[in-house]
Amino acid sequence: MNTLPNPMEAGAEARAVANPAAAAAGEPYGDSRSRVMSEAKFAAALAEISSWPGYAPTPLKSLPGLAATLGLAAVHYKDERGRFGLGSFKALGGAYAVSNVLRRKVAATKGLGPVTSADLLSGAHVDVIGAQTVCCATDGNHGRSVAWGARLFGCRCVIYVHEAVSQGRRDAIARYGADVVEVKGNYDDAVRHAAQQAAANGWTVVSDTSYPGYRDIPTDVMHGYGVMAAEIAQQMPGGEPPTHVFVQSGVGALAAAICADFWIRWGSRRPLFVVVEPVTADCVYRSLETGAPAVVHGSLETVMAGLACGEVSELAWEILRGGANAAIAVDDRYALTAMRLFAQPRAGDPPVVSGETGAAGLAALLAVRDHPELAATLCLDANSRVLLLGSEGDTDPAIYREVVGRAADEVLSA
């Protein structure tokens, strides 16, 4: 089978914008960006997270059949479905931030020097840990990570979800012992409510988005995400960087973390960096277009649930305003087609189980296939070696089966 499904028949929308403020290829990462995200803190996160029970690098899958069909030199897919059994990359960020909150609390309360994750897991500090409560707002995956981290290390957890979060994702969070509370409105409304409740109750917000006066914990989250980048650098064939990275945005935390790590790691050889968003929640796209953080209002409804965010994180923007080369906004139909395409691999490719958000990168490539005028904006051609960030697997199995027509196990065993 050499052709791909064509959502263009249904008028699926896509648009791309080049970042007029993008840093030149040879521009160094620099001191100002290092104050946001640094090589030392990426290394510290890798050291802690790789010490946790069950840690293993997730696979980087090569998809030569897909690349040939799309007219590209190579496509690689970082498959986060198996990360700590949580089904998404979020396990790296939220849980790492929870561990840091608790490590600092134990050290301050007991007058200790540096406290490690192993110290938290030893049972020696349950008196301090058990008295703590962490909370956050979520579209699904981040809340699951925070809840898992709270259970792993032994503190209480409250997770706030907005109205559009599916029951399957709510149930997945609750299985880790968190209290799950619905907030009327969209994701950004839930973020504000979580901050208000934390202030009123003396809890700690563990958010992946930053705002004025709240930066340290989101910085921890983002450095946790850098574990993906470290693994990818080890897994790329011949150690060579890709020419392009397509990364889904949401509030921008993952995008900024991968962008920062690759910039530090590869310098002038760093790949072109393309941010992918739904057309209904394109806050980074609009921010790059205007040169300043832009807010998208309304329901933000999209099947790419993890990307239903209307405000870019303050910290993420400090990296992306110069680090992103372009952004592309795509219709939901491209994401659904991408999920099905991953499940029906081209000749020679392995099957991939990807959720709606995880399929965003391929959705962007399909959009470029249907809107060839966008290729020049994204500098894509037959020599492009593209990295896609498979941020999640079937995090809601019921939705996955409805979209693909088969359960994940059936796809993988075919």
Image (tube, grey):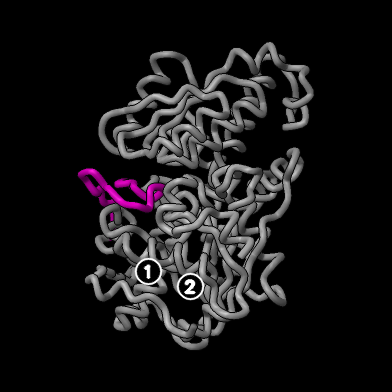
Q: Nearer the viewer, residue 200 or 278?
A: 278
Query: Considering the image in quadrants, where does the C terminus appear?
Result: bottom right
At 38% from the left and 26% from the top, the residue drawn is 195
Q: Position of residue 291 (x, y in %)?
A: 29, 60
| Residue 161 falls in image quadrant | top left
Please indicate whether residue 332 sits to the left or right of residue 394 in the image: left
Q: Which residue is mark 1?
A: 326
Q: Residue at x 69, y 44 (%)?
A: 44
Q: Are marks 1 and 2 in contact (CB under 8 Å)?
A: yes
Tell me: residue 332, above or below residue 152.
below
Q: Where is residue 85 shown, x and y percent of the image?
A: 64, 43
Q: Would residue 53 appear left or right of 11 to someone viewing this image? A: right
Question: Is any atom of residue 268 visible in this view?
Answer: no
Residue type at mark 2 is Leu
Is any part of residue 289 visible from this angle?
yes
**Which comes before the other along the chain, label 1 or label 2?**
2
Q: Which residue is mark 2?
A: 272
Outermost residue toward the bottom in this view: 382
Magenta region: 291-311
Q: Is residue 349 left or right of residue 111?
A: left
The foreground one among 225 and 348 is 348
Q: Main secondary structure of the magenta part?
A: loop
Badge 2 marks a residue whose secondary structure is strand
Within-10-Å neighbours for mark 2: few <14, some 14–19, many 20+: many
Residue 15: say if magenta: no
Name the element at disc 1: strand
Where is residue 389 shown, x and y percent of the image?
53, 61
